[in-house]
Image (spheres, rainbow, N blue to C red):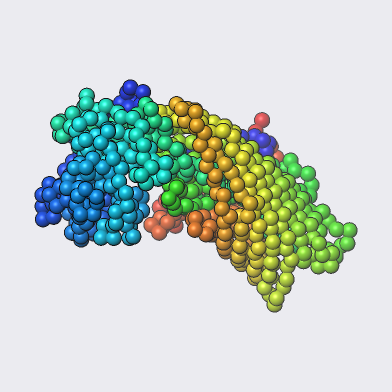
Amino acid sequence: MLIHFAKKLTIFLKKLFSIFLIFNLTCVSTAQAAGVFVDSFSVNSEETEPRGLTFNNDGTKMFVIGWTGDDVNEYTLSTGFDVSTSSFVDSFSITNTVPGKENDPRDVKFNSNGTKMFVLGRANDKVYEYTLSTGFDVSTASFVDSFDIEDEETDGNGLAFNRSGTRMFVTGHSGDDVNEYTLTTAFDVSTASFVDSFDISSEDTSPAAVAFNDDGTKMFVLGATGDDVNEYTISCAYKVTSSSTCDDPTTIKDVVGSIEAQTEGAKRFAKYSSGSVLKRLTFIRSHKKDGGLWSVIGNSKDIDVNFSNKTLDQLTNLSPKFSVHPLQKILPEGWALWSEGSVSFGKIGETGLSSAQDIRALGITIGTDKKIDSSKTSRFFNTVYGIALRLGHDEVDIGTYGSKVDTNAISLSIYGTHYTNDSDESGFIDGVIGASHLNTDLVRKNSGDTDTNKGERDGKQIYGSIKFGREFEHNELNVTPTSRIDVSHTRLEDYTENGTEALRYDDQDINSLKGSLGVMLDRDYILETAILKHKANFEYSKDVASNSKAHSYYVSDSSKTYTYKANENSQDIFKVDFGFDYTNEKGLTLSGEFERELINDVGRTNTIFFTASFLSRKETEYLFSFNGDEESLGSSIKIAKILGPFNLGLQLENDLYSQKNNNLNLSLSSQF
């Protein structure tokens, strides 16, 4: 029955989330009608013969170069990339700052942080390099060095670099081509060497400028003859000529983002698999003194709570489709059945290496455990052991182009707790070990939603946690300091993308070792027929020995393997959560918890846990749910009772804002 349940739930989760011609380049189109004119900004007061244009990263600064003033003009934009908001700031002379008095500057470019500036000069056929003590502030520029391009181009017009500054591209009138150079030191033109050229004379005989999209899979050349922009697709990043190699994929932010998402996703599933079990043991321990309530507490955790938020609603709609009652019937006497659901959402910010990640994770854990009664009747029990099955879905959106990592996973855990203090059961050790299987669908898209690369990857995982703690009572407050060690090892199998820029990845091992210190505070409020428990938990963790290396190479060029070390730095993690448990003598249990986890200098994750159910001793099951928001709110009550061979069901739905929208459903069924 558990296997059948797991298969049905897995299927449900899957449904729920569920330029190259002549070796390398192809001229795709001439962009003549795709653009729509918006506005213009006159630079006539500063430059009457503008030739080059570039922006800083967020579009709040614009730079124009020309050969009338022989200078670089700097403008600020109050609205990023909106030229109508431009205002002139300053200019920097090229003529008097370089050897040979360059009086025909044609283009200007910066490195990623604006601390280096490069000027293409036609008079001397050179690329000039400057350093800026303040990024993107031309008034702080000073000349460093130059590189001669005369052997390849004597009428240079356009200049461009790849993201990492290890490649430089120059186009011009004399060669009617794009010339590619490699730089052994990033953004240092003194280390440049010529590679090859790519002929564009079939599209235009007077190329005036060259540019690339963000990931180097498209090249654009401005043509003075045709007065148009010619677009080219590239088989792999920045490989413009047949003599060059593909760009290092670990410099592509979405590639790095995908590797990190897979690495962190595997660690996250291990954490939740152990965490759900440890929460179960905490729940049992916090009610160990309420012996009269044990029979209903042990069997009461189920899910049937609905939210207006789409992601939450997807999780909480799981439980009504799979009744927990048949599982309870087949369990041996003395075993308790429980379940827990969680939904997490978080964000990892963009870095210099990786794209931003939006994270959504949900899962459900179903477990069964047994308490071992002590031989001393004065004690409630001193040992609990059990087994738990978790199914989870992890979805990570990467960057802005549509790249994503979707993982479905299943784990099986064996767990237990033992009290170390025989006199008052205040000390305890919790332990859990388990194994998981992961299946991941991967999508990597380039800018403009083009050249989609897809792949599928399986993985295997083992994990374990051990937790030490001791409970203290101070007045009516319970204080429980804890320490914990979490360890996991995951092997992701090799896989190959399909697509024009496809990568192949070797097996990837992911190791994680984390230590934690925390304290839990809780207090019981004894009501007439129930217990209300408020609780708070504060925890500091350090990821002390996590490591993983991802090895990849291009399908179109397997001569070189690229390696990325994922999450090699130790991380400081701060976690706080608040929640409540409500249990009455009739068997109703409501539990809610909100958890916020902050990873220092990386990002955050928020997790919501919620359970609500009732399971009595008379083979009757009651489930309550609610849904809605500030504009609409509804509730639902479901009752299921076994009458011999028949199942009787009743469901009442209420619209709390309107008495006209109420439904009552009655059903009688039997299984043969």
> Which residue shows up at 57% across the image and 41% down it?
549
Q: Residue furthest right?
A: 375
Question: Within the image, what quadrant is residue 207 found in?
Answer: top left
Q: Residue at x 26, y 57 (%)?
A: 138
- When asked about the image quadrant of residue 181, the answer is top left
Query: Residue at 30% across / 42% down in the picture?
Result: 147
User: In the depicted view, which residue is nearer to us: 503 or 158?
Assistant: 158
Q: Position of residue 665 (x, y in %)?
A: 52, 44
Task: Judge whether residue 31 can be spotted in this image.
Answer: no
Give the residue displayed 25% in from the left and 30% down from the top.
177
Image x and y of residue 151, in percent: 27, 33
**How many marks on residues?**
0
The N terminus lies in which quarter of the figure? top right
Q: Nearer the viewer, residue 349 or 158?
A: 158
Residue, far bottom:
475
Q: Position of residue 397 (x, y in %)?
A: 44, 44
Q: Nearer the viewer, residue 101 or 483?
A: 101
The quarter in which the C terminus is drawn is top right
User: Which of the 4 quarters of the picture holds residue 79?
Assistant: bottom left
Q: Is residue 310 left or right of residue 474?
A: left
The residue nearer to you, when weighing 448 against 620, is 448
Q: Is residue 652 above or below residue 503?
A: below
Is residue 370 visible in the rendered structure shown here? yes
Q: Residue furthest top?
A: 22
